[in-house]
Image (cartoon, grey):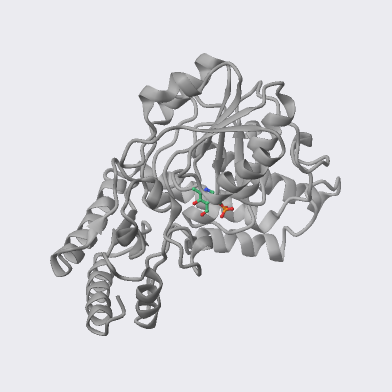
């Protein structure tokens, strides 16, 4: 199998599997229990929290452990709005569905939702910030890197505009954290969501970093997480997350880690473009090293994905949750990608474990499938 769907989820690393196994076999007790095995589980959870905090340059006590990136985002956005007297949420049209759908829902509940204007490639138009982010804004929520294209938003500039307006700044770092360096001390944001299953942890644990002093109303009440998020801790997923964070941090410290990944992605794109000259890379600016979004004009992405799947290549069209629908990706359309290209666009996403051999095999499979579809009139 050639797995090129790492923005959907990643294979757990060996250390994460071992940590989850330990939790299932031995540390299965309730971390809130006062007895000795309960306290052993507590100690393991706190060590995992520390590793997750170190990955973003944070203090462990400032992390809220949740069930997913989606829940972290939900807590950040609803939690801030519930506390604030201001009624405006600022976001973009290229956010993940966990932000877009929540914003739409909140809009129906009386929150004023403003979208930041985008430049033609999909980047937030910095020049437009002062006109949108004013003193009525409670929260600005903009993703760090886009899940479909890897496009990296100018978070520091957006955060500065939020700060100037006295608004809280949340960043959806689900695709960024664990794949690229993140330091919350250097970046002037207030809240950062991330998700260990995107960097070789396990599903079932998400993280929200909260800058000290930022107050949130919980969305799930209970005593855990210092009253910020109720629910008995998912110890296996949390220990896997901690192990994955440690591994990701070690990998990020290796010289040239991300650039060697980018080289593989670039080889993948170059060899596809050589075989399919009318293919288009949907980029739009600086991208996360592991993500490639390629359009094959006139083709139907779903047909291509099915053919690729038959050849053992796992890829996706846009967000995993919107595949299965024949609508072109709203993110690509918002970036200004023509509908004819957006319809035939697929996402190939690498991991730090992807090999050059896999890249070569994937490129030739893509080229062969595109040729086959075009020859059979499947375009
Ligand atoms: N935000 C982005 C940018 C994502 O790519 C995803 C998942 O694909 C999420 C949020 C949601 O994260 P989770 O799958 O952990 O709920």
The vertical placement of 362 against 228, above or below, is below
Q: State left or right for residue 365 relative to residue 193.
A: left
- Say which quarter of the image contains residue 339: bottom left
Q: Position of residue 16 (x, y in %)?
A: 54, 59
The vertical placement of 64 against 366, above or below, is above
Q: Position of residue 164 (x, y in %)?
A: 50, 14
In the rendered image, the quadrant that contains the C terminus is bottom left
Q: Residue furthest bottom?
A: 376
Q: Is residue 54 visible?
A: yes
The vertical placement of 197 against 361, above or below, is above
- The one nearer the camera, 8 or 304, is 304
The vertical placement of 363 against 140, above or below, is below
- Say which quarter of the image contains residue 49: top right
Q: Residue at x 69, y 36 (%)?
A: 78
Q: Position of residue 211 (x, y in %)?
A: 60, 26
Q: State left or right for residue 136 relative to residue 268.
A: right
* Number of marks drawn: 0
Q: Position of residue 236 (x, y in %)?
A: 66, 58
- Say which quarter of the image contains residue 305: bottom left
Q: Is residue 47 visible?
A: no
Q: Residue furthest right?
A: 34
Q: Residue at x 24, y 69 (%)?
A: 363
Q: State left or right for residue 371 relative to residue 88.
A: left
- The one nearer the camera, 209 or 307, is 307
In the rendered image, the quadrant that contains the N terminus is bottom left
Q: Residue at x 22, y 78 (%)?
A: 371
Q: State left or right for residue 42 relative to residue 60.
A: right
């Amino acid at each position: 199998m050639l797995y090129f769907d790492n923005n959907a989820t990643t294979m757990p690393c060996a250390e994460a599997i071992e940590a989850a196994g330990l939790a299932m076999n031995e540390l299965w007790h309730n971390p809130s229990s006062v007895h000795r095995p309960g306290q052993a589980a507590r100690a393991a959870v706190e060590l995992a929290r520390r590793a997750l905090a170190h990955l973003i340059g944070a203090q462990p006590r400032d992390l809220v452990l949740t069930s997913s990136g989606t829940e972290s985002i939900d807590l950040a956005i609803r939690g801030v709005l519930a506390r604030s007297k201001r009624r405006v949420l600022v976001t973009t049209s290229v956010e993940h569905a966990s932000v877009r759908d929540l914003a739409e829902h909140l809009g129906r509940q009386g929150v004023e939702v403003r979208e930041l204007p985008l430049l033609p490639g999909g980047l937030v138009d910095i020049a437009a910030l002062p006109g949108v982010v004013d003193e009525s804004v409670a929260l600005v929520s903009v993703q760090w890197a886009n899940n479909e294209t890897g496009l990296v938003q100018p978070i520091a500039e957006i955060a500065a505009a939020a700060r100037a307006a006295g608004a809280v700044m949340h960043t959806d770092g689900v695709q960024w954290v664990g794949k690229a360096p993140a330091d919350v001390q250097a970046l002037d944001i207030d809240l950062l969501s991330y998700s260990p299953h995107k960097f070789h942890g396990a599903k079932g644990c998400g993280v929200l970093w909260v800058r000290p002093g930022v107050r949130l109303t919980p969305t799930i009440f209970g005593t855990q997480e210092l009253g910020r998020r109720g629910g008995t801790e998912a110890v296996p997923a949390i220990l896997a997350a901690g192990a994955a964070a440690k591994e990701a941090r070690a990998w990020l410290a290796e010289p040239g880690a991300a650039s060697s990944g980018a080289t593989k992605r670039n080889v993948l794109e170059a060899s596809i473009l050589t075989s399919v000259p009318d293919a288009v890379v949907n980029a739009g600016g600086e991208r996360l090293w592991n993500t490639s979004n390629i359009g094959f004009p006139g083709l139907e992405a779903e047909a291509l994905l099915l053919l690729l799947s038959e050849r053992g290549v796992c890829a996706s069209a846009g967000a995993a949750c919107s595949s299965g629908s024949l609508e072109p990706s709203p993110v690509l359309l918002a970036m200004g990608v023509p509908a004819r290209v957006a319809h035939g666009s697929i996402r190939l996403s690498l991991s730090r474990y992807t090999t050059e051999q896999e890249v070569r095999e994937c490129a030739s499979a893509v080229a062969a499938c595109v040729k086959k579809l075009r020859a059979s009139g499947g375009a």
